[in-house]
Image: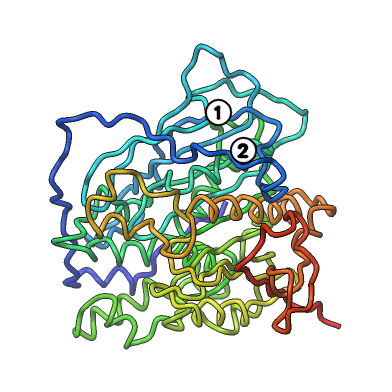
Amino acid sequence: MYKKTLSCAALLWLSTTIVVSANTQTQHANTTPQPEQLYPTLLPKEALPELAQIGQYPVGVKTLKLVNKKQFNPSSQTLEDRKLTVEVWYPTNKTPTTTPKAVYRDETRLGLPFVLQGNATRNAEVVNLTGQPFPLVVLSHGYTGYRTIMFYLAEHLASHGYVVVALDHTDSTNAEVDMVKAPFSGFFSTLLNRSRDQQFTLDYFSGTNNFVSSIIDTQRAGLIGYSMGGYGAVNTVGGCYQFNQQTAATFTGSKDVNVINGAIELLNTCAGGQKAPAKVDPKWKAMIAIAPWGGNYQLFNAESLAKITTPTLYVAGDLDDISGYKGIQSLYQQTGGDSTYMLTYHNARHNIAPHPAPQIAYKNEIDLGHYFEPAWSNMQLNTINKHFALAMMDCHVKNQKDKCSFLQLNGQSNEQDAQGNPTPTWKGFAPRYATGMSWDMKKPKS
């Protein structure tokens, strides 16, 4: 277990004046939305990337309430129990045909409720199916977001033999942040807690008695973070934060030197809240950072990035105007290890991980802008994400060497070079079905 404590210097930061505003969004409880099916059209099997096809296991899902005790709360300036809601997907074969499939209830950034139809079965029985434990994968959303924003990925990985846990990062969800009146109210908590929440989730499910204890692999885990979740994920596998006077002032909104120094003391940690020298939990066997934030502000220490050995895949849109494509490229270029990859979606911006927009989001740009990609179908992005996420987890978490070949790709996917000469189709994709992407990977050290 990797427990963290705050230093005395950090606790002196009780005089800070960061404003954390409670969400005052209008409640929309008058109507109950009907479940939406976001993936109504199934492509022919031949048109799907090979590893995007559904796995052999039916999937169960359960919601849990967890508590990470005595964590520093920037709002109250005290140590408090940090409450976290998580969604857990798991392989099963006990899904009664009379039980309806799960639905996922969430709300948009403006507080408009919606209900999405899933393919998992709520509270299905946990069964030891293979005699072998299933590895854990932790999913971490962006700012703002919610735990089911990548439910398609969770259900997919669970169907292939993973226990997947996605968490609502407290102070950082659509339900808690008023994007009109106080859009940055939860941002400092996000900076402080992303990696801590990720590591706590691993500690809880690998080190305590819980409802999936009988089927979970306590020694192997993967981590997938989107946007601020990616910011946390890079830290969790060893990329230390290096906030300085300027960046700490920017993200606290304060000119008070004591506040700024207190923020630096709190934030500059590694691997789930540890002070250097930090030890990365060896259970993390693979990490995927989708549109990770922070590289655009040089928030990660280059020396620590170079020491990362956890196999890592960066995924980015080359027009990302939130995390900045050059910032993500710099993280990839500085990250050490032979198994470091980068997938680029050309002509994509930042919204390359969420499920497609629910219908209610089309009422306004603030909500639609949380999902919409102008040049890409979100469903297609989701499909490709499923393929590469499974390749990474099977190769590096389950150590299935045959799956590693799906990560050994030539530079671009268009099946022709700049001069029009044919190039090989990417492994796992049917001819003509993999355009608009490029792939980079580190050369093994000689």
Q: Position of residue 188 (x, y in %)?
A: 30, 67
- Given the current orientation, which residue lies at the most extreme top position? 98
| Left or right: residue 56 compared with residue 292 | right
Above or below for 266 versus 92: below
For numbered disc 1, what is the local secondary structure?
Answer: strand
Q: Amino acid at mark 2?
A: Ala
Q: Residue at x 73, y 79 (%)?
A: 420
Q: Residue at x 35, y 62 (%)?
A: 190
Look at mark 2 in the image and give the residue it sits on.
158
Q: Position of residue 265 (x, y in %)?
A: 37, 76
Q: How many marks?
A: 2
Q: Residue at x 61, y 60 (%)?
A: 287
Q: 196 and 327: which one is in front?
A: 327
| Left or right: residue 91 compared with residue 99 | right
Q: 340 and 13: which one is in front?
A: 340
- Given the current orientation, which residue lies at the most extreme front position? 420
For numbered disc 2, what is the local secondary structure?
Answer: helix
Task: Tell me whether the residue at label 1 lies in contact with that at label 2, contact meaning CB atoms closer than 8 angstroms.
Answer: yes
Q: Amino acid at mark 1?
A: Gly
Which mark, by number, is residue 60?
1
Q: Earlier in the sequence, mark 1 or mark 2?
A: 1
Q: 79 and 268: which one is in front?
A: 268
Crowding around mark 2 (Cα neighbors within 10 Å: few <14, some 14 to 19, many 20+) is many
